[in-house]
Image (spheres, rainbow, N blue to C red):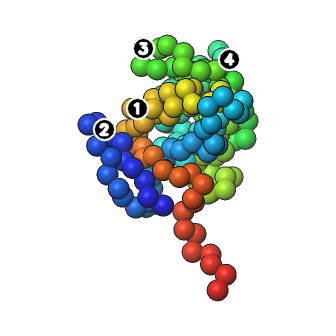
C-alpha cells in the first residue's frame, strides 16, 4: 500500500509501507451531507501517542490517568471526549476506541476516532493528527491514501 508522508513543508512523497510505520486514514466514506459518523483509524506503534496528543476525555479520572501514567486506554473500551487543536479549541466531540496489540485485526495498536460525519469534522481531525505527525520516537505519522487497501499479508491461497 502506498502512503504519503506528512512533512513540515507539506511536500508529500510516495513511499511503500514498511513495518513499524504508524498510519492514519479515514476508514469510512466521506460524503457531504450523508452519514452521521466518520471513522479515522490510527494504526501502528505510535497510534496511542498520536491520539493522546489531540484527545481529551470528558471524564476527569480518565483524563488524569492519560496525563499522569498513560495507561488509561483499555483495549476495546470506548471513551467519550473531545478532539482539541493546538490552541485548545474543540474541533469535535468524539468516541475513541483503542484496540491494543495483539487484540486487533493487524495485531498492532489501533485507535479508531469516531467523529461527526460529513466532510468538515473528519478532515479537521485528520489534518490535526497529521500536523502533530511526529511521534515520540521521531518517526513520522503517515497517511494511507486508501484505507480500504490493507497491507500484503502474504497469505495467498495458491
Q: Which mark is residue 158?
A: none
In the image, residue 4 sits, relative to residue 77, either above or below, namely below
Q: Dot 2, how many residues are within 10 Å of its Cα: few (below 14), some (14-19), or many (20+)?
A: few
Q: Residue at x 43, y 53 (%)?
A: 3
Q: CA distance from mark 3 to mark 2?
A: 21 Å
Q: Which mark is residue 10?
A: 2
The residue indicated by pointer 4 is 59
Which comes sooner in the sequence, label 3 or label 2?
2
Which comes sooner in the sequence, label 1 or label 4?
4
Image x and y of residue 103, in percent = 69, 52
The residue indicated by pointer 1 is 132
Q: CA distance from mark 4 to mark 3?
A: 21 Å
The residue indicated by pointer 3 is 87
In the image, residue 109 sits, relative to residue 74, either above or below, namely below
Front residue of 77/81: it is 81
Q: Residue at x 61, y 31 (%)?
A: 32
Image x and y of residue 19, in percent = 46, 60
Image x and y of residue 144, in percent = 48, 50
Q: Residue at x 28, y 43 (%)?
A: 11
Q: Furthest residue to the front?
A: 33
Secondary structure of residue under mark 2: loop
Which comes sooner in the sequence, label 4 or label 3?
4
Q: CA distance from mark 1 to mark 3?
A: 13 Å
Secondary structure of residue under mark 1: loop
Which comes sooner in the sequence, label 4 or label 2?
2
Q: Dot 1, how many residues are within 10 Å of its Cα: few (below 14), some (14-19), or many (20+)?
A: some
Q: CA distance from mark 4 to mark 2?
A: 35 Å
Q: CA distance from mark 2 to mark 1?
A: 13 Å
Amino acid at each position: 500500500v502506498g502512503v504519503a508522508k506528512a512533512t513540515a513543508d507539506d511536500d508529500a512523497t510516495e513511499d511503500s509501507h514498511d513495518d513499524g510505520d504508524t498510519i492514519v486514514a479515514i476508514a469510512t466514506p466521506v460524503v457531504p451531507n450523508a452519514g452521521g459518523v466518520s471513522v479515522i483509524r490510527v494504526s501502528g506503534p505510535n497510534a496511542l501517542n498520536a491520539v493522546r496528543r489531540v484527545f481529551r476525555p470528558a471524564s476527569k479520572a480518565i483524563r488524569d490517568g492519560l496525563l499522569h501514567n498513560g495507561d488509561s486506554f483499555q483495549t476495546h473500551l470506548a471513551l467519550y471526549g473531545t478532539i482539541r487543536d493546538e490552541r485548545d479549541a474543540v474541533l469535535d466531540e468524539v468516541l475513541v476506541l483503542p484496540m491494543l496489540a495483539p487484540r486487533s485485526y493487524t495485531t498492532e495498536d489501533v485507535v479508531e476516532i469516531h467523529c461527526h460525519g460529513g466532510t468538515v469534522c473528519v478532515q479537521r481531525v485528520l489534518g490535526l493528527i497529521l500536523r502533530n505527525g511526529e511521534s515520540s520516537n521521531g518517526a513520522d505519522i503517515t497517511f494511507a491514501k486508501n484505507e480500504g487497501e490493507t497491507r500484503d499479508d502474504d497469505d495467498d491461497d495458491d
